[in-house]
Image (cartoon, rainbow, N blue to C red):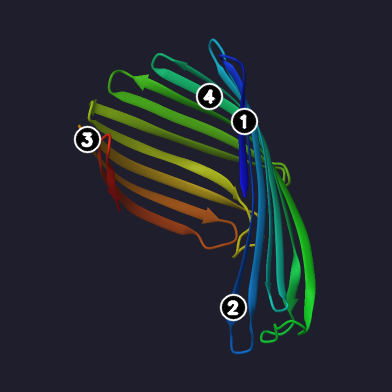
Amino acid sequence: DGALALTHRFSDRSRLNAYIIAFEESYRFLTRTNYLTDEFEQEKSRQLGIISWQNEGEAWNWSLSQMIDSDRNEFVLGNIETRPNRLNAYTAFSARQEGRGFSREFGLQFDYFQDDVSGTFPLSDYEFAEGDPSDAYAYQTTESLLTAYATMEQRIGEDFTLESGIRMARHLTEADNRLSAQASLHYKPSIRHRIILGGGHYQQLLSPGAEITQWQWLQLNQVSMSYQMRKDLRSAHLAVYRKWEDYQFISDQNISGIETRIGYRTEALRFWMSG
C-alpha cells in the first residue's frame, strides 16, 4: 500500500489539497467441508483520490472537491468465483458564512456509482469443486444522484441555539426526488450543562450488499434527546433515541436505544467508557 498527500497555497486564503491512497490485499486459507477441501482465495485492490480547493472570502468560505474511488475484488473457492468491481465518484461544491450568533451553508453534490459483478456458480448445491459443472454470470448497474442542501444555525438569546437543515436528492437514473429535513434545539442552562432535542426525516440511497443485489432507498425517521456535562477534567453524556427504518426490499426496523459515556482527560491521560 501507499499514500500521498500534497498541499499548495495560492495565498493566505486559498489552497489546493490532494490525497491519493492505493493498496492491494491477498488472503488464502484452507476450507474444509464434507464434499470439498480446498483453498479459499481472496484478492482486493483499491485506489482512492481526492482533490479539493478551498477559498476563504470576506463573507463566505467556498470549497470544490472531486473524488474517485475504485475497488476491485475477487473471491474463489472451487468452481465458485465472484468478481465485484465498484467505481464511485463525486463532485461537490459548498459555501459557508459565519457571523455573530449564526452560520449558514449550502451546497451541491453529484454522485456516480457503477457496479460490475461477474463470476461462476455451481449447478448443484453439493458439487462446487473445481471442474464440477458450473455456469457463468455477469451484470452491471449504474446509478447517479444529484443533491442540493442548506443548513442554518441560529443562536436565540443566551441559552438556546436552533439548528436546521434540508436536503433534496434527485435520483437521475429513476427520475425520482427525495426530501430530507432535520432540526435540533440546544439548551445551555449553564457553562457546564447542555440539553439537546432533535428529530428528522432522512432518505438515503443504499448500495447493493450481501443480502440485496439492488440499489434501494432507506427512509428513516428519528427523534432523540441528549444531556451533556463537562466539569473540570470530567465529562458525561446520556442520550435516548427512537428511530423507524423503512427499506424497499428488506424488513423494516424500529429501534429504541440509550447511550451513555463518561470521560476523564488530562494533558497526559485520556480515559472514557461508553455503553
Which tag is nearer the camera, tag 2 or tag 4? 2
Amino acid under label 4? Glu
| Other-residue count near label 3 (Cα within 10 Å), few / some / many at <14 / 14–19 / ≥20 | few
The residue identified by callout 4 is: 105
Q: Secondary structure at mark 4?
A: strand
Confirm whether residue 92 shows in the render: no
Specify which label sits upstream in the sequence, 3 or 2. 2
The residue identified by callout 3 is: 233
Q: Position of residue 47 (x, y in %)?
A: 67, 47
Which tag is nearer the camera, tag 1 or tag 3? 1
Specify which label sits upstream in the sequence, 1 or 3. 1
Specify which label sits upstream in the sequence, 2 or 4. 2
Q: Position of residue 29 (x, y in %)?
A: 59, 74
Q: Position of residue 99 (x, y in %)?
A: 44, 14
The residue identified by callout 1 is: 6
- Tell which of 102 and 19 is nearer to you: 19
Q: Is residue 143 left or right of residue 200?
A: right
Q: Is residue 139 left or right of residue 61?
A: right
179 relative to 54, above or below: below
Q: Is residue 274 left or right of residue 202?
A: left
| Other-residue count near label 4 (Cα within 10 Å), few / some / many at <14 / 14–19 / ≥20 | some
Q: Secondary structure at mark 3?
A: loop
C-alpha gap between disc 2 and disc 1: 42 Å
